[in-house]
Image (tube, rainbow, N blue to C red):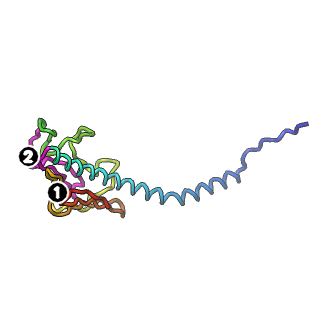
Amino acid sequence: MFARQKNRGFSLLDLLIVLMILGIMGVMVAPQLYSMMTEARLNEAAREMVSGLQYAQSLAVIHQRPFGLKADVDGNWFRVFDYQHRDDSNPHHEETPPVDGYGVVMNPFDKNWYVVDLDTIHTYEGVNIEAAPTDGMISFYPDGHSSSDDSSFVLSYGGDTLTITVDGTTGKIRVE
């Protein structure tokens, strides 16, 4: 009455066709995936630097004294510092906020000193600080403004760059 059908499975030709289609899709998607990863790495490093700038600005407003961010192009790092202790190698852990040697302040999120070395953090590997203000330093004052001139930091990864600009008069931070 009912004929039994034989379960034959996939043939070698079926598997080869599927593998060929997956290979073609992989070749088409790989460059876009690499581009997205490059853009994400650069954006993440820029967000980290913008967070440092915003933190320095908010500390200046809250504590009514200058705070800043110093970037070292050669060393590929930046730090947030308390201006009144920036030349002092002694830590001032009793201060509010706590200050380590050379005025480096405590990062409120990870409870470490606010120094970001782009060469040693895997997330930012390959991202470079290409340009910074003349001395690599920007200071924020109690009313939120920075220096009288605009200051720019340029981050690069591969062939892509992002410029972080701080308006000296308003203290507004832009990423382009």
Magenta span includes 45: no
Of residues 22 and 11, the one nearer the viewer is 22
Q: Secondary structure at mark 1?
A: loop
Q: Bounds of the magenta span?
A: 63-92
Magenta span includes 66: yes
In the image, is 88 to the left or to the right of 32? left
Residue at the image position 13 percent from the left and 37 percent from the top: 93
Residue 22 location in percent, x, y? 60, 54
Residue 9 location in percent, x, y? 73, 44
Kindly report which numbered mark, 2 or 1, lies closer to the viewer in this rendering.
Answer: 1
Q: Amino acid at mark 2?
A: Asp
> Residue farthest to the right?
1
Give the mark, 2 or 1, whose residue is nearer the N terminus: 2
Which image quarter holds the C terminus? bottom left
Give the residue at mark 2.
Answer: 88
> How packed is label 1: few (under 14 Cα within 10 Å), some, or many (20 or more)?
many
Q: Secondary structure at mark 2?
A: loop
Q: Amino acid at mark 1?
A: Ser
Residue 96 location in percent, x, y? 14, 38
> How packed is label 2: few (under 14 Cα within 10 Å), some, or many (20 or more)?
few
Give the residue at mark 1.
Answer: 146
- 3D distance between C-alphas at marks 2 and 1: 22 Å
